[in-house]
Structure formats: structure tokens, C-alpha cells
Amino acid sequence: MGIVQDMAPYDLPPEAWSDGKNVRMFSGSVWKDFGNLQVFGALSGRPLGLFPIATATTQFYAYPGAAAVWATDGTTHADITRLAGAYTGSDADRWNGCSLGGILILNNGLDVPQAWMAPGLATKLVNLANWPAGYTAKCMRTYKSYLIGMDMTESGTRIPYRVRWSDSAAAGSVPATWALAAGNDARYWDLIESDGFVIDCAPLGDVNYVYKDDSTHSMEYIGGQFVFKFRKAFNFGMLAQDCVREWKGSHIVMTQDDILMHNGASAESLLATKMRDWYRGRPDQTYFTRSFLALSETDKELWACFPQQGQTFPDIALVINTETGKCSIRDIPNTSSWMYGFIQTGSVISTFDGFSGVSFDAMVGQFGSSNFAQGRKRLAMVSQAVNKAFLMEQGYNFDGVNFRSYIERTGLAIIGRDRQGNPKVDFSTKKLLSRIWPKMRVANGTIVKVYAGGQETVDSPVVWKGPFDFRPGIDNEVCVDIEGRLHAVRFETTDGTYWKLDGYDIEIEPIGAY
């Protein structure tokens, strides 16, 4: 079931976990999360965005800051800021963008949108040709062959409910006009059914879905005078820009109080009865606008990333396995942006002589295999706090620093099994938890910390005991001798050890009512 925090621990089935961090749920087991590894070398500035774009021969990555934009091919870096001078944004002005026929469009909501017409490290950005003078768009995306501007400011007046689109662009070109006129498709539509602001949009099949902060609207091509037809689809909105991903014919959306999946006709929660209460109110009330939803198709995981209360940039990810729906939680490095794509770098290749952080014996997996492949898409993030780009789910630590990884279950009132072999619970009888048999896979001699605890009532705090050292492959059990009406267990490491937990058995003996 993964980690479940929307139910009291004593109400959870035995196979559920009540807490944990920096672990993942995969193939019926709990695995320590992989870490992250620096890529692209030293960045040229403080990154507030990360946008991949490929030519016929080279993969590039643009990473804008507040006043400048840089780019790299994975090795060499260059300043591609427009010749007209610095940009006027700040941390509060989020960079967004899209690709239009091999042209990268970048936008910060304050300046004229930028176009990287022929991506290359010697090519500067230019102001988007034919963009209306005195206009800005809070968000800019592509739909079919149109550029879509949302939350417009026009001649000094902000129109947050406006969706404006260009004329259709020819292949390899930017739109010729944004001016409404007979004979072109440039138009706008005001979504005024609610007070909400337009946040973002994303296509699903042939339909574009426009997300306000309080509602969702479909945008469908019909041609003719109106070009697009708009229809209100749902009463939920989006938390922030870049909080929607497409997965198997549906959109998955981070809202203010849930993560929902919809197919355009109906919607369902991915967090109900699991982590919805945990998620509600957890993003910082000032900086929630920097949240984002990342999808790793390779790992079949969604990462709902946001700044927790008191943080200014996303520092935590609620991870959802897209195949099983199981949830877990992991730390991320104060991230300002992300990408999922091909990562061009040779720096992640390790040799026996140069590898550090974990011994050969401690590696879990088959010799010759790797969790990194140069030719497959991977998840990467940039951190404005340390001015680095990271390949996620790589290595055994966070950029060379070990991290705490643990999984925990409290509220266990098991006293035995019934006639059908199902766990039997009893909250009134006092019991002795004497031994724990972890079913762990890790290198021989590696120490895993095991904690055990007891509770007298369902609402009393857990009294923990430990840590008890457990060496998988050498030790078979941990002797703990913990009294209580309810019990708790935790498995934890704080070093570079990589481990897998398939489950555990416990020995419980009733010792009376008092």
C-alpha cells in the first residue's frame, strides 16, 4: 500500500506503512531511493529554469536566470541572453516555455517572449517576432501550430482571465501575426465564468485544456470565425504553472488540495484515503506558485514537488507510482525547475578505480547493469540554492552527501492470526514484541538500524527503543523485547548503503490485560 498518512496508523492494514522518507515502492518491496548526481559541470549562473531542445545533431539545454539566459550542450556553456540586454525578472517571475517546430520559446511574464531560432551556443535569443508591442503573457505554450499566451497584460492593463493565441505558424517559423484580422486565426477568449486567473494549459489528444486556479476549460479547434471552442470541463483548478502531466490518455493535475487524474469527462483522486490530508496545506502559502509536477516515464513515477511551509523553493516530492498508486516521500535539492529527456554527459560513467560512496559488495543488482542509460530519457533538476544541475535517481547519495532513508510502521496491534490466516488485532491486551525478522537484501556486513517501539493506547506517543544493529546476510533476527498494547517498527540507514526490504516478520506474545 505504500505510505499512508490519511488514516490513523492503528486503522491501517499490516502491509501499509505509516511514515517514511527517501524510499520508493517498487515490485512489492521498499527500496532506498537512489540519490542525485551533478551533471553539465559548473553552471554559468543561478538557474531558475531548465529547457531541453534538440537539433539534428546536438541536444541543448537552456537554463535562464533572473536577468540572463545560458545554455549548454552538456559540456560547454554559453550566455545566450538577447543582445538588447538583461531581463527584468526576479525569483517571483517564473520562466516557462515551449518548442514550436524546433524553435525554443522562453517567457518570464515580464519581458517580450524570447525565441531561440536556431539553437546553438553561438546563437543569441531574440525578441519573439511579431509580438504585439506593450503586451506580456504570464505563461506561453504551444498548441498545434499556435502559440498560446495566458494571463495577459495589454497596454499596461492585466487581464488574468484572457487566453490569446497567434495566427498559425508555418514550419520552422514563428507566427506572422497576433493581430485580429479577417484571413488569419489570431484571436483571444476571456474565461470569465469564475474569478480565477488562467495558470497554464496542456493538450490531451486533440483538445487543449486550459487551467485556471479554480476551474478547467477545454479548448477545441473548430476553425471558422471563432477558431477555437471553449467549454468548462471541471470545477477544479491548478496549483501553479507546470503542474500537469499527460499519462496514458489522461491528465494528472496538482490542485490546491489534491492530485487528480481526468480524461476530459470524469476525474478521480490519486491521493484519496492515502495522502490527501497530508498534501493539503503542506505547500508554503507564499511560494506554492513554484511547485511543479514531474513525470518519469522510465521509472513510472510522478513527482509532485513543492516548497514546504517556510521554504522558498521545492524541497520535497510526493512520489506516486503510476502503475500501483503507492505513495512515498523524498527530499529534493531546493529545486527551481526540472526536465525529462535525454541527458548528454559522460561524467556519470563510473569506473572501479574512480567509484566512491558505496562498495562493490554493497551494490544491489546484476553485475554489468545500470540504472543509467545514455540513450534513454531521464529526470533532471536544477537547484538555484547551489547553482547545479542534477541527474535524479542516480548514485547512492545526494551530490556526495549521505542522506537519511527510513520506512516506519506504528499502531500495530497484531496478536496472531485467525483461522483464515489473516492478521488478528487486539487493542486491549498487553503484548511483548520480542523479535523482528527483517527480509532485507543488502551487502553482507552492512549495518541497518532497526528501531522498535510500544504504545499503551492508540493515542499515546510511541516509546522507541534502539537502534538495534542488523547485518543482513549475517544476522537473521533482531531481539528487542518491547511491551505495549500496540507496537512500532522502523528500518533506517544514514550512509551510502543501498538496500531493499521485502517485508518483515515479528514475534508477539500476549502478557495480560494490564
Image (cartoon, helix red, strand yellow):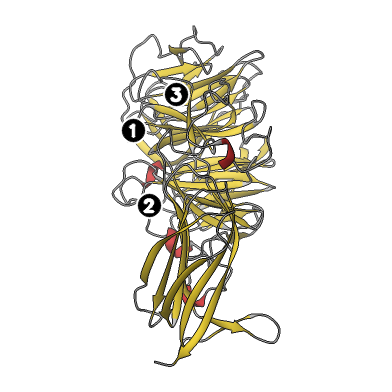
Amino acid type of the residue tagged 3 in the rendering: Tyr
Quadrant into which the C terminus falls? bottom left
Chain-order first, disc 2 or disc 3:
3
Q: Secondary structure at mark 3?
A: strand
Q: SS of the residue at dot 2?
A: loop
Q: Which of the two discs, 1 and 3, labels the residue nearer the N terminus?
A: 3
Q: CA distance from mark 2 to mark 1?
A: 18 Å
Q: Is residue 213 above or below residue 89?
A: below
Residue position for label 3: 63
Q: Nearer the viewer, residue 308 or 285?
A: 308
Between 30 and 476, the one lying in front of the other is 476
State whether residue 425 is above or below residue 312: below
Which residue position holds label 1? 385
Task: Check disc 1 and give the amino acid type.
Answer: Ala
Which residue sits furthest left? 310
Q: State which tag comes first along the sequence, 2 or 1.
A: 2
Residue 346: image tag: none
Find numbered disc 1 in the image and state the secondary structure of the residue it sits on.
loop
Q: Position of residue 192 (x, y in %)?
A: 46, 49
Note whether 499 is above or below 139 in the view shown.
Answer: below
Q: Position of residue 398 (x, y in %)?
A: 44, 37
The residue that disc 2 covers is 283
Q: Position of residue 282 (x, y in %)?
A: 38, 56
The type of residue carrying mark 2 is Pro
Q: Residue at x 69, y 87 (%)?
A: 419
In the image, what residue occupies the spot 50% across and 10% down?
121
Crowd band around label 2 with a 10 angstrom C-alpha radius: few (<14), some (14–19), many (20+) = many
